Amino acid sequence: MMIRRFAPVLAWAILGGLLAACSSSGGAFNPPPSGPHISSTITSGITANAGLYGAVTGPDGRVWFAEFSGDNLAAVTTSGTVTEYPTGASTQPCAITVGPDNNLWTGGYGASIEKVTTAGVVTTYAVAGAHVCGIISGPGGLLWFADYGNNKVGTITTSGVVTEYAMPAGSQPDDIALGSDGNLWVTDDTTHSIIKVSPAGVVLNQYSTGISSGEQPNYIAAAPDGNLYFTEDAFSSSIHDKIGRITTGGTITEIGTLSPNSYLNVITIGKDGNAYFTEYSTAKLGKVTIATGHVSETSPGLAPHGNQAITAGPDGRLWIGGKQTIWALTY
């Protein structure tokens, strides 16, 4: 009977001692960090000052990054092994997506678009004068891209046939997303507007974000609530950077205000259905809680000055690219 009475007491005493020991020594009983936190930091195998701009989960289960300054695509396994594939001298890739043919497609400042197989075989298609900052797999089995250099939105077939459509006078398209309405939505930082384009390449409308505010629409992503969210940079020490939301009916609302010169960059949708964005000039990660429209920031330990690329990885983590570092964040 004494064993029955005192064994539980003894067991709890031992467990309490283990808990205290683990707590004081940083052991497994410590509570996990709150909010997104870095679980992997990867530098090996990345070209120095590569400038990781765009990111996407590839069909091979690796996360692929476009290296603007390195003229490469970098593919990283979820365990952290990086393989670089050259895209060609002075291609300066900054946009990347997976095409309907399960190849990687990338564009940049090199007046071309590249198709890259998962084995790294590159096919280059010339697009004279093009600066391609955004590319997606879109309607009609086509790749759609925003051509900043030619003031156009274009399509390219998986066999490399390019068609471009003129945008409103004075525009310079930055990024492109496919809306829940089946149309293409394009950010234009020169006219401070969002342009809606039909799958036939027809400009359906141009919605001003308020040119007097000074913010310039940058990157854009379609969210599960049917709206699109975009980053707005003011490039001013006196004007706050912001997050914008636009409905498919064209109603724009600015839902978040960030510090001036944060230089908000790429925005993506996470596994939880919320939007996450990078800030080029800070070490912060931004979040838009879609259900409430609340915008928040955390400091998970990124390096400042260079964070651009972000995507939801195949392993349930957020993957972020900086100048020459890749981080995987658990959230």
Image (cartoon, helix red, strand yellow):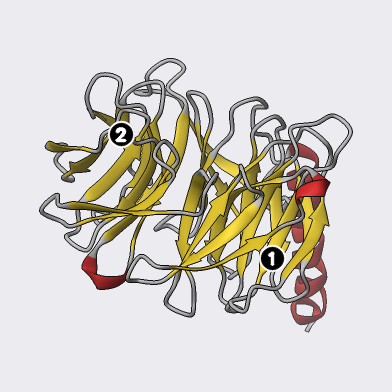
Above or below 4: residue 121: above
User: Does the rendering let one see residue 145?
Assistant: no
Q: Quadrant of the C terminus?
A: bottom right
The residue that label 2 is drawn on is: 73
Q: Which residue ends up furthest to the front in the rendered image?
A: 169
Residue at left 46%, top 56%? Answer: 176
Alpha carbons under labels 1 and 2: distance apart: 31 Å
Packing grade of label 1 (10 A; few <14, some 14-19, many >=20) is: many
Instruction: Give the image location of residue 209, x and y in percent.
Output: 72, 57
Residue at left 25%, top 58%? Answer: 99
The residue that label 1 is drawn on is: 245
Query: Which mark is first along the chain, 2 or 1?
Result: 2
Q: Is 121 placed left or right of 225 in the picture?
A: left
Label of residue 112 in the image:
none
Q: Is 108 placed left or right of 316 in the picture?
A: left
Packing grade of label 2 (10 A; few <14, some 14-19, many >=20) is: many
Instruction: Give the image location of residue 31, x and y in percent.
Output: 74, 54
Residue at left 69%, top 65%? Answer: 245
Q: Which residue ends up furthest to the top in the rendered image?
A: 48
